[in-house]
């Protein structure tokens, strides 16, 4: 029997999911025009690294590929696949099969089209699915990763348990995600939940996963000032497309969030099923 509290929690999660779907169905193409095909933050090696956003986002993908370190021919799950760019980079560099999932049917359709354009349709595929209820049998993947997708999932422990279910024993899961700091001010708070770093680790452990690495890389994800200014200018140039989706106040917060260093933290976690 479901309690009233459980029912209310389920309704709340459903509302968040609906808002996330609406956001990405409407905003993905605008975001790609500004940010590129990687829908995650960039990684800069040090203060001398002046890479633009597209190179820097590839550099973050490479950080996750190095940690996942899959053997050729393995099957990898991409949780929250966006339009597929990290999956394509992984498939090429490691010679693996990748299955991406997203609750945005628009993103799944666009990613599937791009797999064909990249000549990777035989090894990289995408499915419309909820990460909390993955449509795969137990122990059907050799590894997994999630780029900034758990931020949209209020019950992170449930999602992590579900990912663990579909991983084979001894598999690796790599996470790249945001965490809250004392001065954190996030945009789109109705679709984003970010625990503090210590709580994030505790959630991972409660899900039955073993933490092998848990690293604060916030400093490496703060873009150089010229990159931030260009992103802000590109966003302002698209304001007529964005404001109808966000409202003027949220849009201003977005621009400010791009222009100044972020107040939230960023972590990389490498965990295993046992």
Image (tube, helix red, strand yellow):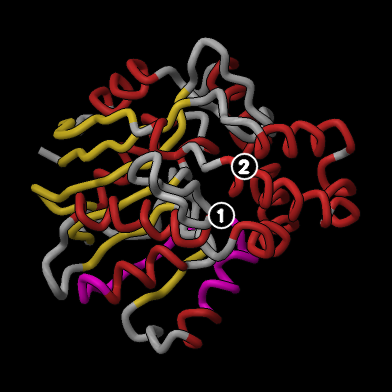
The residue segment tinted magenta is 93-112
Q: Is residue 120 left or right of residue 235?
A: left
Q: Is residue 229 above or below residue 140?
A: above
Looking at the image, do the residues carrying marks 2 and 1 touch, with CB atoms under 8 Å apart?
Answer: yes
Q: Position of residue 52 (x, y in %)?
A: 52, 57
Q: Is residue 259 left or right of residue 66?
A: right
* Disc 1 element: loop
Q: Which residue is labeled 1 in the image?
A: 103
Q: Position of residue 29 (x, y in %)?
A: 69, 64
Q: Is residue 240 above or below residue 182?
A: below
Q: Is residue 119 above or below residue 31?
A: below
In the image, residue 95 lies in the stretch drawn in magenta: yes
In the image, residue 17 lies in the stretch drawn in magenta: no
Q: Residue at x 20, y 38 (%)?
A: 271
- Work out whether residue 12 or residue 180 is closer to the camera in this orientation and state it: 180
Q: Which residue is labeled 2 in the image?
A: 17
Residue 14, by quadrant, is top right
Q: Earlier in the sequence, mark 2 or mark 1?
A: 2
* Disc 2 element: helix
Q: Position of residue 262 (x, y in %)?
A: 57, 29
Q: Is residue 267 left or right of residue 265?
A: left
Q: Quadrant of the C terminus?
A: top left
Q: CA distance from mark 2 to mark 1?
A: 8 Å
- Work out whether residue 14 or residue 270 is closer to the camera in this orientation and state it: 270
Residue 240, by quadrant, is bottom right
Q: Residue at x 62, y 42 (%)?
A: 17
């Amino acid at each position: 029997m479901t309690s009233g509290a459980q029912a209310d929690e389920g309704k709340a999660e459903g509302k968040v999911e609906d808002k996330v779907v609406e956001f990405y169905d409407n905003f993905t193409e605008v975001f790609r025009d500004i940010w590129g095909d990687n829908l995650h933050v960039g990684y800069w090696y040090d203060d001398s690294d002046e890479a633009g956003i597209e190179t820097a986002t590839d550099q973050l993908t490479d950080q996750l590929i190095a940690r996942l370190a899959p053997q050729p021919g393995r099957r990898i799950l991409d949780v929250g696949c966006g339009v597929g760019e990290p999956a394509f980079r992984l498939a090429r560099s490691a010679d693996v099969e990748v299955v991406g999932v997203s609750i945005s049917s628009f993103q799944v359709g666009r990613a599937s089209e791009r797999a064909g354009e990249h000549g990777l349709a035989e090894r990289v595929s995408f499915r419309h699915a909820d990460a909390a209820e993955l449509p795969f049998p137990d122990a059907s993947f050799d590894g997994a990763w999630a780029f900034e997708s758990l931020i949209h999932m209020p019950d992170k422990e449930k999602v992590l348990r579900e990912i663990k279910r579909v991983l084979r024993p001894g598999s690796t899961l790599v996470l790249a995600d945001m965490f809250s700091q004392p001065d954190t001010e996030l945009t789109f708070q109705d679709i984003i939940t970010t625990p503090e770093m210590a709580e994030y680790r505790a959630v991972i452990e409660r899900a039955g996963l073993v933490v092998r690495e848990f690293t604060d890389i916030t400093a490496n994800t703060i873009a150089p000032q010229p990159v931030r200014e260009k992103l802000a200018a590109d966003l302002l140039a698209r304001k007529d497309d964005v404001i109808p989706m966000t409202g003027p106040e949220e849009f201003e917060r977005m621009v400010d969030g791009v222009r100044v260093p972020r107040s939230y933290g960023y972590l990389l976690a490498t965990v295993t099923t046992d």
